[in-house]
Image (cartoon, grey):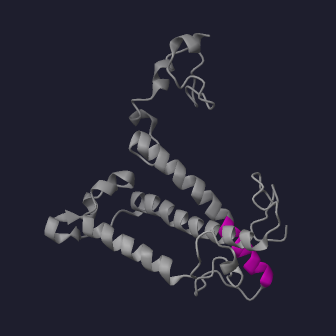
Amino acid sequence: ENELGVQEPVGFWDPVAFTADGDLLAFKRRRCVELKHGRISMLACMGYITPEVVGKFPGYLSPSMDLRFADIPNGLAAVSKVPALGWVQMVAYAAYCELSGPRTRAANTSDYADITPGDYGFKVLTSDDPAELTKKLNAEIANSRLAMVAILGMFFQDGLTGSAWGDWALYTASPLRAYESEPGVQAPVGFWDPLGLSASGNEFDYKR
C-alpha cells in the first residue's frame, strides 16, 4: 500500500489479484512494464493530438517521392502512407530504445532484483524534496494509466469513423443507426445503448 501508484479514491487496486502471492520481484517486473507502456501511450496520445492542434512539420517527409509531411493524414490512415524506409527508421529507433535499457530475460523475475522501475539512465522528473518527487512520480503513473486507456479509445474510434475524435456522423456502417429515429432518442446522448443490447441490429429483439 506504500508503493507509487496507490492513490485515492481506490487505493491499492488489483482486481485480478496479480499480486496476491506477495512476490516483490514479480511486482517490480509488472511496474516496469506498466511504466514503459504508459510512457509509450502518452507519446502516442500526443502524436494524435499535436498535429491537430499545432499542425505538421513543414517541408518534405520524402523528397524522392515528392511526399510532404502535410500529405500524411493523422491517425491510423498514416500507416499506409508512410514510406517503407520511414518504418524501418522508426522500428530501428524503437529497437535501440529497447536494447539500450536494462536487459531482462522473458518470463524471468530475478533479473529485476537490482532494477529501479522506470529508470533508464536519465531522469526527467526530479526534486530534492522527497514529498514533491513522490507527487511527480505518482502523477506520471496516473497519467500513464489514463493514456493507455485513451490511446485504445482513439484507435477504436479511428478504426470505426476514420477520426480519432470519433465523429459519429462518419460511422455510417453502425447497426445502431437503424434506431436513430425511434422514440426516446434525444439530445444530448442520442441513441444510447452502453451494454450493446441492440448491437445486432435485429428489429425483433429491439421491439421485444
Q: Is residue 101 left or right of residue 89?
A: right
On screen, 163 above or below 5? above
The residue closer to the viewer here, 65 or 58, is 65
| Magenta-drawn stretch contains 129 | no
- Does residue 152 appear to the left or right of 31 in the view shown? left
Residue plotted at (75% across, 59% down)? 18
Q: Nearer the viewer, residue 122 or 127?
A: 122
User: Which residue is at a point 14% across and 70% down the rendered structure image?
Assistant: 64
Residue 132 in the image: state x and y as whole percent: 75, 79
Q: Main secondary structure of the magenta part?
A: helix
Tell me if 30 is positioned left or right of 97 in this view: right
Query: Residue 23 occupies which quadrant of the picture?
Result: bottom right
Could you tell me residue 41's position as x and y percent?
54, 62
Height in image: 150 above or below 203?
below
Is residue 54 visible in the rendered image? The answer is yes
Q: Would residue 178 be found to the left or right of residue 85 on screen?
A: right
In the picture, the quarter occupied by the N terminus is bottom right
Q: Residue furthest right?
A: 1
- The range drawn in magenta is 130-141
Query: Residue at image x 59%, y 78%?
Result: 104
Residue at 21% from the left image edge and 69% from the top image edge: 62
**Camera sees residue 165:** no
Pick whichever, 125 or 148, lies toward us.
148
Total of numbered circles in the picture? 0
Provide residue 186's location: percent of width, then percent of height.
Answer: 58, 23
Q: Quadrant of the C terminus?
A: top right
Residue 137 shown in magenta: yes
Relative to 169, say whether 22 is above or below.
below
Q: Residue 126, located in which quarter of the rendered image? A: bottom right
Q: Nearer the viewer, residue 80 or 28?
A: 28
